[in-house]
Image (cartoon, helix red, strand yellow):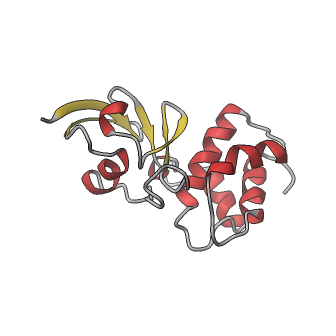
Amino acid sequence: MEQTIRLRINGEPKELTVRPRRLLVDLLRYDLGLTGTKEGCSVGVCGACTVLVNGKNIASCITPAVFVDGCDITTIEGLAEDGRLHPLQQAFIDYGGFQCGICTPGQIMAAKALLDENPHPTEAEIKEWMMGNLCRCTGYYKILDSIKAAAGSEA
């Protein structure tokens, strides 16, 4: 049995018909072609699939698409405006906050949720917030520097 859901994805209204068990990560990647959202662990603990739902970060790999009916979804593709990268995206480039890139979209989306809630976090607050986003390449220092730079803190 399929269900029709209505939502906004990166500012665009969508009406989609989905199966009840269709996961949000699959809807984004395979149905809508928004491949920036990655699936890492499939159990909601690595953060690679992080997207914003009504401004809050969620693990899209464990969220049924029907649960976001009526919501605003923002993916990594929705951050740039008028061809200009979001300050977080630019900071990750400028400060080397990525290597292989698998976790980068989730890192940036989680950091966006943080900076939306707390525009000037301390280093300790950044570390605590970002605990749910794993990276196997960078060692986290460059990610931390990138977020601090985007927040206007001294990196």
* Residue 152 image position (x, y, % from top left): 80, 46
Image quarter (top left, top right, bottom left or bottom right) of the N terminus:
top left
User: Which residue does the image show at 27% across and 30% down from the upper left?
Assistant: 6
Image quarter (top left, top right, bottom left or bottom right) of the C terminus:
bottom right
Give 89 or 142, whichever is nearer the viewer: 142
Left or right: 84 as drawn, with respect to 16: right
Vertical comparison of 80 with 1: above or below:
below
* Residue 75 image position (x, y, % from top left): 46, 47
Left or right: 155 as drawn, with respect to 22: right
**Residue 85 appearing in the image:** no
Name the residue at the right extreme. Answer: 154
Locate residue 107: give its quadrant.
bottom right
* Residue 119 image position (x, y, % from top left): 74, 36
**Residue 44 appearing in the image:** yes
Left or right: 53 as drawn, with respect to 16: right
* Residue 47 image position (x, y, % from top left): 55, 53
User: Which residue does the image show at 47% across and 53% down from the upper left?
Assistant: 49
Give 132 or 153, whichever is nearer the viewer: 132
Left or right: 134 as drawn, with respect to 144: left
